Structure formats: C-alpha cells, structure tokens
Image: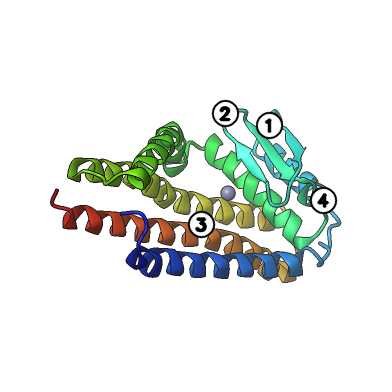
Amino acid sequence: MFWDLKYFLLVMLPSLAIGLWAQMKLHSAFGKYSQVPIDSGMTGAEAARHILDQAGLRDVPVEEVPGQLSDHYDPTKRALFLSSDNFHGNSVAAVGVAAHEAGHALQHLHQDAMFNLRMALVPVTQFASYAWMGVFFIGMVMHLSHTLMWVAVAIFSVMTLFQLVTLPVEYDASARAKEQLFRLGLVRQDERAGVSKVLDAAALTYVAALVGSVLQLLYYISAARDNRN
Ligand SMILES: [Zn+2]
C-alpha cells in the first residue's frame, strides 16, 4: 500500500512536481517584492499593528519570531507572529504578508465560519497525524489487513479535509489583507499588483498541498478497494 512503482508515479511524482512549482513561484514572487520598498516606508510590524488597531484589536500583540516565512497568527494565544524579515522589512512583500496574518486575526474577531471550523479541526488533525504514523509504520513492517486499510483511509481523510478547509481560510485572509491595506491607504495604487502576486503565490503552496493530499487519499482508497484479504 505504501511503497510501489504505481504509488511513486501516480502520487509522489505529481505531488513533488506541483509542490516544487508552487515553492518556485513563491520564492520568485517573494524574492522580487522583498526588494521593492513600500512607498509609505512602513515595516510589516507597523502595518499589522495599524490594521489590528483599526479593527479594535489593540490587545493582540505583534511579535517577532525566528525563521523564514514562519509568519502566523496564533488563535489560542491571540497573538500575531512575524518572521524577522517581515517584522522589520518595509518592502511590498513584508507588508503584504503582515497584512495577511492580520487578516487571520480579523477572521477570528468576526468568527468567520471556515476559520472556526479549521480551528476545531486542529486537535482532530493532530490526533489523526499520530494515528497515521502508527498505521504507516505497521504497513511498512507487515501486510495491512483489509479493515486496517480502511482505517488508514479514514484517518487520512481527516488530514485531507483539514487541507481542504485551510484553502478558503487562506484565500479569505489574503482578501481581507488587500481590502485593509487599500482602505487604510497603507499601499499605493501601483503597489497593489505586487501585494497580490506575493499573496497569490503564498496561497498556491496550500493548493499544492491539497492536490498532493487528494492524490494520496485517492490512491489509498483504490488500494483498499483492490485488497480483498
Ligand atoms: Zn495564512
């Protein structure tokens, strides 16, 4: 079920290809627009702070975290974390990413349905990924029974569902980011395209992850159906 040529050709190869393509798009968009200074001179941290304050979220802190593109909003801590480059950077890319993370805080504030669903799925998905490692290990050392294969399919479905729910949440956060940046006058008319390119490229990595996950799930379903033991 886990290792054969069919799996490699139908799942691994296309997933790797689309994943690499998305990463390349992201790195090229990010590489380009992190070199383009924003006219307002604002840093990512300042832009995020401004959007949060305007939404009445003065109590949500904007903090710096190590790593590259490690930017995220943590709903359990109600805090926004920006990577050093985007925290201090005053480029079109830095401000775009910072505004995207602020977009997640706005989703949280407005109790966006998909955002809430994704948050509810986090513990379930964490449990599923542990269970998946168990099944994966058993599958590597011995032949999986028919029942265990369907258990594996059920566990993997949870992880695919999580990727599926993530997609609209990410697109919505970017839409909110663009709306706030333009409404509050944080980016100029001619800077809009750059912000969009960076955020669209970032969203593409989530599309790639979902495609990979769906391919894998379909493969497991077909393997479970073929197995008559
Ligand atoms: Zn996001």
Kindly identify the residue that appears in the image at 33 percent across and 45 percent down. 139
**Earlier along the polypeptide chain: callout 4 or callout 3?**
4
Per the image, label 4 sits on a secondary structure element best described as loop
CB atoms of marks 2 and 4 within 8 Å: no
Residue 119 at x, y percent in the picture:
47, 36
For the question of whether residue 158 can be seen, the reply is no
Mark-to-mark CA distance, 1 and 2: 11 Å
Kindly identify the residue that appears in the image at 35 percent across and 54 percent down. 2
Q: Please name the residue that numbered disc 3 is placed on.
A: 206
Does any atom of ligand 1 lie closer than 8 Å to the CB of label 3?
no
Q: Classify 212 as above or below 21.
A: above
**Earlier along the polypeptide chain: callout 1 or callout 3?**
1
Q: Residues within 10 Å of mark 3 (few under 14, many from 20)?
A: many
Residue 134 at x, y percent in the picture:
39, 37
Mark linked to residue 76:
2
For the N terminus, the quadrant is bottom left
Amino acid carrying label 3: it is Tyr
Q: Classify 88 as above or below 138.
A: below
Amino acid carrying label 2: it is Thr
Q: Classify 93 as above or below 106.
A: below
Say whether residue 226 is left or right of residue 88. Answer: left
Mark-to-mark CA distance, 2 and 4: 25 Å
**Earlier along the polypeptide chain: callout 3 or callout 2?**
2
Mark linked to residue 60:
1
